[in-house]
Image: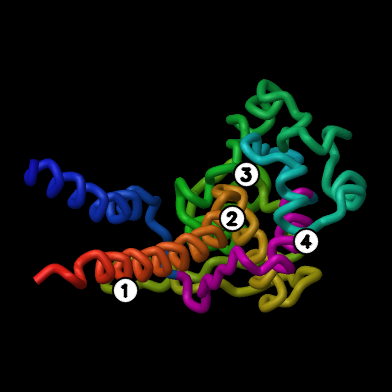
Amino acid sequence: MRKIILLVITGLLLAPMTAMAAWPKVPDVEGLELNLDVHNKASLQRGARLFHNYCLSCHSAQYMRYRRMAEDLGLPEDVVVESLMFTTDNIHETMQVAMPAEDAEQWFGQAPPDLSLIARSNGPRWVYTFLHGYYQDDERPVGMNNLVVSNTSMPHVLVELQGIQRAIYDEVNGETRFAGFELVQEGSMSPREYDRAVTDLVNYLTYISEPARLQRESIGLWVLIFLALFTMLAYMLKQEYWKDVH
C-alpha cells in the first residue's frame, strides 16, 4: 500500500515536468517577456476581439461556447452577437468556422487546427513567440516565414498590425545563428502596442483552454476558508470531548 501511495505522489509531481518537456522548443527571442493574467477581464475582452476578428475565420474553438465567454468576460449578449459572432446567430453555439475543412486543406495544404486547447498543448509562450516570429521570406508563396514553425502554411494574419520584419543572422564559429528581427515596414501598431495585443490574444487563448479555471480558483478560496474553520471547530470539539480524560 505504501508503494502505491508513493507511486501516485511521484506521478503527480512529475506530470507537470513531463507536460513541459513535451511542449515544442521555443526560440530565445530577445525582448519577448510574456506576462499573462486570466483574471484581467479588460485584457481578455481585447484578446477576444482579436481572436474573433483575425483567427476565427480559419481556426475554430469548438470546445468553447459564446454564451460562456460572454458570462465570464462580462460582455452583454447583444454585443457578442453583433461584434463577435460571424458564423451563427445562436449564442449557445460553440465557436465554429464556416470554411469547409476540405477547402482549407486544398488552399493551405492542411486544415487549420482547432485552437481550443492550443495554449495547453503547446504552452502560452510557444503561441506568444509564434505570433512574434513572422519575418519576410521572398521564397515562400505568401512572402513570409516563421521562426518557430519553419515553412508554416499559415499566413501572417496580423501583418497589418505588426508590419513586416526581416530576420537577422550572424556567423558564430562557422555556424549561422539567429540574432534578432529588424522592422522594414511599419504596421498600424508600434512594437509595444503589438506586443500588448499579442499578450491579450494569448491571454484569451489561455482562458478558453480552461474556462473553468476562473470559477475553480474563486471557489477554491472559499473551500480553504471552510476547511480552516472546520479544522478549528473539530479541534475545539476534540478538546471538549477529552477534557475529562486523564
State the separation of the CA atoms marked 1 and 2.
50 Å
Residue plotted at (85% across, 39% down): 86
Say which label, 1 or 4, has the lower sequence index.
Answer: 4
Res. 83 visible in picture: yes
Q: Residue beneath label 3, please?
A: 154
- In the image, the segment drawn in magenta is 29-52
Residue 50: % across, % down: 75, 56
Q: Residue beneath label 1, please?
A: 172
Above or below residue 191? Residue 101 is above
Q: Crowding at label 4, few (<14), some or many (≥20) Cα neighbours within 10 Å?
A: few
The amino acid beneath tag 2 is: Gln
Residue 56: % across, % down: 73, 43
**Callouts 1 and 2 close, C-beta under 8 Å:** no
The amino acid beneath tag 3 is: Met
Q: Is residue 140 magenta?
A: no
Q: Crowding at label 3, few (<14), some or many (≥20) Cα neighbours within 10 Å?
A: some
Q: Residue beneath label 4, please?
A: 160
The amino acid beneath tag 4 is: Glu
State the separation of the CA atoms marked 3 and 2.
34 Å
Say which label, 3 or 2, has the lower sequence index.
Answer: 3
**Residue 19 left/right relative to 125:** left
Residue 79 disc label:
none
